[in-house]
Image (cartoon, coloured by chain):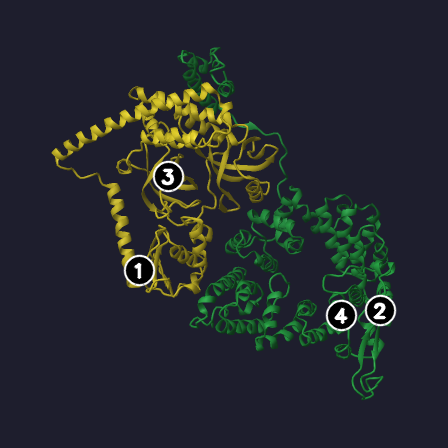
Chain colours: A yellow, B green
Amino acid sequence: MPWTVEQVLALAPDAASAKAGKELGAARRWATLGADEVCVWGTLQGSGKDPYQTCLDPSGPAFKCTCPSRKFPCKHGLGLFLVFAQQPAAMTEKTPPAWAAEWLAKHSEREKKKAAQAAAPHEAADPSDVARAAVAAERRAATREARLAAGLEELARWLSDLVRTGFATLPGRPSAFWETPSARLVDAQAPGLARRLRALDGITAADDGWPARLLREAAALHLACTAWPRSASLPEATQADLHAALGMALPQEEVLMQPGIHDCWLVLGRRVVEEERLRTQRAWLWGRTTRRPALCLSFSASPGQPLDLSLVPGSEFEGELVFFPGAWPLRALVKTRTAGTGAGPAADPGLPHASLAEANAFAAAAWSANPWLERLPLALAAVVPVRRVSGWRVRDAAGHALPLAVAEAAGWNLTALAGGRPLSLAGEWDGERLAPLGAWTDGRFLPL
Amino acid sequence: MKFPDYVQVALLGTGRQAPPAAHGDGPLARWLGRLDSSDREAALLSGAALAAGHERAGRLAARDTGPTPEACPKETHPWAGESAGALLRRLLGGEHPNLLPEWLALAASAGRLAPPELLPGLLDAGAADSGQQEPLLPVLGERGRWLAAQHPAWAWVRGAAVLDEAVWHTGAPEARRAFLRRLRAEQPARAAGLLAATWPQEAAEDRSWIAAALESGLGPDDEAFLEAALDDRRKEVRRLAAGLLARLPGSALGRRMAERTRPLLRLAPGPAGARRKTEAQGPAVIEATLPPACDRALLRDGVEPKPPPGIGEKAWWLIQMIEATPLGTWSDAWVLTPAEVLAAAATGEWAKELLEGWARAAVRQGDAAWAAELFSAALAAPRADLLEPLLAALPGPEREARLTPLLAAGTDDARRLLGATGPGSRWSWSAAFSRAVLDWLRRETARQQDEWSLRSRLQGFAPLLHPDTLAEAAAGWPVDAASWEFWSRGVDAFLAVVQCRADLHAAFR
């Protein structure tokens, strides 16, 4: 399936790169252009002496360019991709030049190695090394736990002060009010709680629902503080959820060693959020046969570090996912992909939640299993957007409705898309409002 | 002890109020009862965690009792394809927005509709610029009309899409405007009748746009109404009416103005004493007498008494009187062609004012024959400030015929005029003229080093090129010239628009 301009531009690390990439997305800017079944390549004169050599593999997608830019993909990679997407006829060369063939060979070898690593268990090491490493690790863990326990005690006191004084005094507090305790949590190595606490800065400026929202978050943080000292007595799955909430993620290699779950995975949508300098991408998947959702996170701490571009909203692929442990496992890693890497949207997504009552029951299971869960995906098979005094909503055939988290203009776009008939809609549900991720209608998919 | 009770306490602070106590014997109450209540703060937070989880997990979907819109009727035309839709999204997103009219025209002639998710953006564009409304209508489809009916800002669609007189009597101002514009374009007499009938009840602020709507399809039937509007209370309406009457052939205002102005201009014998051009005693000269006063009658017919800076007030009155006098008056009176009139007026004391008055008259009265001669006269005078409006008053082929030699000569006028008639004008170039412009641009970019204004306007020329010349526009630029460093970015921006247009045409092929 061909890539669209929007899909290509969505790969850009920032707006400036997207703009620069668009400027290079015209065949005339390139000295040579070519493509075969697996690879796209091109050269163009940049500011350097030698022309830049750019190539890419649209199935990944993966990029390579000889320019010195630290951004990834660079503007040349994006530009080349745009030319390929918009003017396939301009790709006149049919055999890859040596440099492109070389990169492609290296690239596919790397991919194979990665897959092999994921599949194979670690090799056995020298027993004495293992023992020494274990002692050192234990000592590190002890220091870490002491620091974490102290940090959580401090957070518990801070939360106590917060509710003793009352929320009514909060409006007008400077950012430092939230940032200071958040920074302490980072020091205590509880980045998950630190992030949630920092996100509360500015909450009082939102609509009238803020005190309830704040209390929910404060209660979730408090719950983590009280659960930690007695975590050994908790069920294993709940311990895992607590660790995840604190931000003590399992190493990915360890997770990937677990057996995967095979299914046809539909990419419901993708959302990128920026906090401080960290960009986090949430890609939401739905397993067709296993009828379960999955969340694939990808992080980027600098413009040069790419987010995972391989999960294209609206597309689906056959493959194995490994879930992080938990009472209601949601976060997952892609272990293998066996088929379907293109960008093609499924004409009929066959979304699972036939009614809002069903969607609520699905969510209820998640909320009751994991008290720290922030959001989960809903995949509504047939809803109509409607406009009410309180804002936009979606309504199902039974006359139930959920509020949408959309701006006025986006609500109209959704209404236009539906034309008064039910459409399929995927979104992030936080228990209060649904933030649309993508819609299927009239055989088309649209990321929102 | 529902969650909101906990929020209430949290707002006030546990320093002032104790957390809600557990009561009853539901499952939630039983769990709450097991909490340690000795520490108020911890009890509140723990209780809130339980109650919040209980509320969140136990939530049922709310019932929605509001009305749902009727489903939109099925489309009779197909939507534009994937690539055409992607291009429209880019245009609406602010990339080359001046190509929107071209997208609309191509879609309309291909019988394609705009993709539904882009309709709100298009309807907004129509609401922001009434000039865009008519070209938008063919691509809106059933979905667009269905959508527009739900949003007050998009009411213009109803006015423009269906000729229903009820819109005129009871519709929203936006819809009334669109309705009148469309009715006037299709049935000018019916529009005039409707307008005259409701005129007395119209609010003062609506009267000026209503009167302005008569500009399209202006005809003798409108004279009585406009003549009456000369006595309107609003100055804006009076001005509009006078302006429209002056361009209406055979209007009473034109006749009155001719009667006033005719005696002020005199064809005097040439230096050798000739009285008629047929007698070969040297060329005749047109002399002018300035009007003595600006009386009430003159004011009523639209003459503005206060001159702009740099012009004497009597000269200013004369210019405006000539402007409102039918141009035919002069050729008839002296039995001269426009060219001969201009030649005779070129040397007199008031030559400058006469030229300006006639130039204004040619523009206002849309007289192409006079405009063509005046353009030559203004070039020779030279009166650069008059060239632009005169050029705009010429039909396309005439305009290109006048500009081509200027481009070939590479004059400053060519540069200025091309820029002035570029962005925003509805003039699109013939293939031959497009090639002439491209050649001229290639020469200018090779020759000039610091032509800032041309560089900044370069991009504006791209939408005017004839579609047949888009493919050849990228070639032949002086990339090796010393001046290229100055030009390359500007030419790139120009070619980016050209490329976008080529994509557009390809997307609808």
Give the residue type that dot 2 points to.
Thr
Say which residue label 3 marks.
A296
Q: Chain of mark 3?
A: A
From the top left corner, tell me how far across and down residue A224 is, in percent: 36, 24
Residue B52 seen in this snapshot: yes
Say which residue label 1 marks.
A100
Q: Same chain for the residues at labels 1 and 3, yes or no?
A: yes
Tell me which label, 1 or 3, sits earlier in the chain.
Answer: 1
Q: Same chain for the residues at labels 1 and 4, yes or no?
A: no
Q: Chain of mark 4?
A: B
Say which residue label 2 marks.
B261
Which of discs 1 and 4 lies nearer the camera? The answer is 4
Give the residue type that dot 1 points to.
Ala
From the top left corner, tell me how far across and down residue A343 is, in percent: 41, 49
In which image quadrant can residue A180 be found?
Answer: top left
Report, in whole angstroms, how far the alpha carbon at label 2 lies from the one at label 3: 83 Å
Residue located at (37% from left, 48% from top): A341
> Left or right of B367: which side holds A83?
left
From the top left corner, tell me how far across and down residue B14 is, in percent: 47, 16
From the top left corner, tell me how far across and down residue B501 is, in percent: 53, 62
Does B250 sit above or below residue A170? Answer: below
Which of discs 3 and 4 lies nearer the camera? The answer is 4
SS type, badge 3: strand
Say which residue label 4 marks.
B353
Query: Which class describes the residues within 10 Å of circle 4: few (<14), some (14-19), or many (20+)?
Result: some
Residue located at (44% from left, 51% from top): A16
Residue B190 seen in this snapshot: no
Report, in whole angstroms, how far the alpha carbon at label 3 lies from the one at label 4: 77 Å
In which image quadrant can residue A400 be found?
Answer: top right
